[in-house]
Amino acid sequence: MATNDPTRPVYVIGAGPGGLAVAAALRGRGVRAVVLEKADAVGDSWRHHYDRLRLHTTRRLSALPGLKMPRSFGRWVARADVVRYLEKYAQVHELEIVTGVEVSTVERADGDGWLLHATGGRRLTGRAVVVATGYNHTPYLPEWPGADSYTGTLLHAGQYRNPAPYAGKDVLVVGSGNTGAEIAVDLVDGGAGRVRLAVRTAPHILRRSTAGWPAQASGILVRRLPVPLVDRAAGAVARLSVPDLSDKGLPRPETGLYARVREGAIPVQDVGLIAAVQSGRVEPVAAVESFEGAKVVLADGSRISPEVVVAATGYRRALEGLVGELGVLDGRGRPTVHGGRTAPTAPGLYFTGFTNPISGMFRELAIDAEKIAKAVARS
Ligand SMILES: Cc1cc2nc3c(=O)[nH]c(=O)nc-3n(C[C@H](O)[C@H](O)[C@H](O)COP(=O)(O)OP(=O)(O)OC[C@H]3O[C@@H](n4cnc5c(N)ncnc54)[C@H](O)[C@@H]3O)c2cc1C
């Protein structure tokens, strides 16, 4: 059978926004796509994020191909509405989705196409495969010395839902990305007794919008400009719009905003962190080095005794098991291609959702979906 045998479907692994968008774009071009999802419903990542979460990209710039988000969702769409949107998206596009099926490995099929090994000993052969398993499904917890000896509660941000269980408690949030920053604010708003935020590298903080102009729109405009130019402009904007919080323990970052984005660090969109740090309700402290019983040892040598530690330390792509043998990952485990391009060693194997664009991930997923569908239809 040839790779472009139309009786074989294209398999899309993952029913998050990335996978659903690709499946819809393929269907739009008359290509049969089957989405395989390990959870029991679409949008699993968004079902499990913390309650307070809203998209920090605008409703209009976060819609996937072929379905607008309703105006009633407001400008900054709530987590539960993102889930509703993804359910509706799958329905409207009549997507073929098989839930409860986890793909463990992808390999070249004998002759042509791709062979997927999945739950229950399934062996599925597709003319092409799209990996859309997401950036954010395997929690990453650093191997802190002594973490096992910690007598308080240690949890990953992925397990955090809302502040209710932490009312009155002394909590340390580790990591000052968007998730750590927002959970710290959620905790103070929700009545935690004390909230500290452990910061290894001071983040870039942006106002989510300024005079109605969303930060994401600036990200879209500047994304093709030279990094030093964007860094200079972003530095000037930050000095005007974000107060100097150095005396509160949160200095301005030393490296430029776009240079950091290129390394994978998206700026923090302010949803209350600036005010909370200014008023002392969130106290920045040094990075976590290790644990000693009830104590947490910080990089500046100090020891503190929070009752709860929330590790907002990110996620892994965890692609090694799935496609690690195919020569398509770089030294950091990232796919070497995305969108409509495929690696020379792996024609017909596409990736979406593993970049970290300054212009917004939903928007990038939508763009990549069309590119992948076009490339598959052409092949
Ligand atoms: C807290 C947070 C806030 C974010 N906010 C925004 C925002 O405001 N705007 C924006 O544009 N982006 C945002 N992002 C980034 C990004 O848009 C989302 O993470 C988005 O969900 C990524 O979509 P995805 O389809 O690539 O991955 P996911 O949504 O993670 O979907 C991947 C799916 O694949 C499934 N899966 C994984 N492995 C397998 C396997 N082996 N077999 C079968 N199924 C598998 C998972 O169960 C999951 O359902 C945010 C991310 C996080 C973590």
Image (cartoon, rainbow, N blue to C red):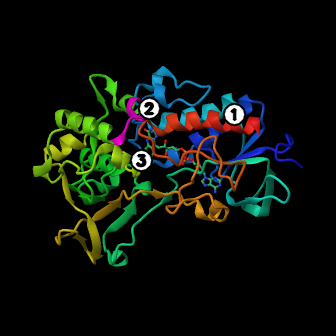
Percent across and percent down for residue 68 are: 55, 24
Q: Which mark is residue 77?
A: 2
Identify the disc placed on residue 374: 1
For the question of whether residue 178 can be seen, the reply is no
Which quarter of the figure has residue 174?
Answer: bottom left
- Residue type at tag 2: Val
* Place of residue 301 in the rendered image (x, y in percent of width and height, measured from the top left): 17, 72
For the point 31% across and 42% down, which residue is it? 228
Residue 139 rendering spot, x and y as whole percentages: 47, 60
Q: Is residue 140 left or right of residue 91?
A: left
Of the residues tagged 2 and 1, which is closer to the observer? 1
**Earlier residue among tags 2 and 1:** 2
Residue 225: image x %, image y %?
39, 35
Distance CA(mark 2)–CA(mark 1): 29 Å
Residue at point 16%, 70% (across, down): 302
Q: Is residue 225 magenta?
A: yes
Please, what is the three-letter code of the amino acid marked with disc 1?
Lys
> Ligand 1 near label 3 (Cβ, under 8 Å)?
yes
Residue pointed to by mark 3: 50
Residue occupying the far right of the picture: 1
Q: Which numbered disc, 3 or 1, marks the residue closer to the eye? A: 1
**Residue 346 occupies quadrant:** bottom right
